[in-house]
Image (cartoon, rainbow, N blue to C red):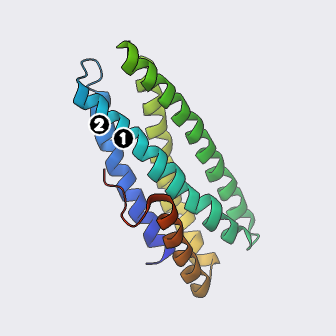
Amino acid sequence: MRPKDNLREDHGRIMKLFVSWQKMLGKLDHPDQALLEDFEKCIDWVEVFIDKCHHGKEDEILFPAMALYEDPEVTSLIKGLHSEHQTGRSLLEAIKIEFKTYSQTNGLPAGLIQFCQGYIDLFRKHIRRENAQLLPLLEKCIPTEAQEQIAAQFEQYEQRTIGPKKINI
């Protein structure tokens, strides 16, 4: 599997999660224990699959490989995407804090919903940007042999972060 295909597959799984997550957000006014457990699993999935695995592959493998080509368009794009990863990590931390407070006190979900929606909106745009700009540049800048090496590194990275099976949503 080429790096582009690997990332597109991740993007599809992430977008499916966002649909499920938004449905859960709509039910937070009257949660039951099952919803709270599913919501917590969703947060875990976001942290492990999206942030550690998917963004890790980009931040630690793909972006450094693409930066070697010293193209100003690539450099600018990578800088922006990496910044969005950092913003997402901050939002995820806020989500975890808000969820803990919400689930322990049965308080109002407004803050939790706001942070979750912010995360979802950020990464829907981010994924569209990657699909439209990053992936075509990857194909343009990186020779086939280097893409094969990146694909192998992606597989090894996935094995280290999520194990032999991808996390199901």
Is disc 1 surrounded by few (<14), some (14 to 19) or many (20+) residues within 10 Å? some
Which residue type does callout 1 highlight?
Cys
Which residue type does callout 2 highlight?
Asp
Q: Quick one: 86 or 43, which is closer to the camera?
A: 43
Q: Quadrant of residue 38?
A: top left
- Residue 76 is labelled as none
**Percent position of residue 133, x then y:** 55, 62
Q: CA distance from mark 1 to mark 2?
A: 6 Å
Residue at the spot 22% in from the left edge and 23% down from the top edge: 32
Q: Above or below — where is 84 with respect to 144?
A: above
Q: Secondary structure at mark 2?
A: helix
The residue carrying mark 1 is 42
Q: Assess whether mark 2 and mark 1 are in contact (beta carbons under 8 angstroms).
A: yes
Query: Residue reaching furthest bottom?
Result: 145
Residue at the spot 35% in from the left edge and 40% down from the top edge: 41
Q: Above or below — where is 107 with respect to 47?
A: above
Q: Is residue 169 left or right of residue 62?
A: left
- Residue 38 is labelled as 2
Is disc 2 surrounded by few (<14), some (14 to 19) or many (20+) residues within 10 Å? some
**Percent position of residue 46, x then y:** 44, 45
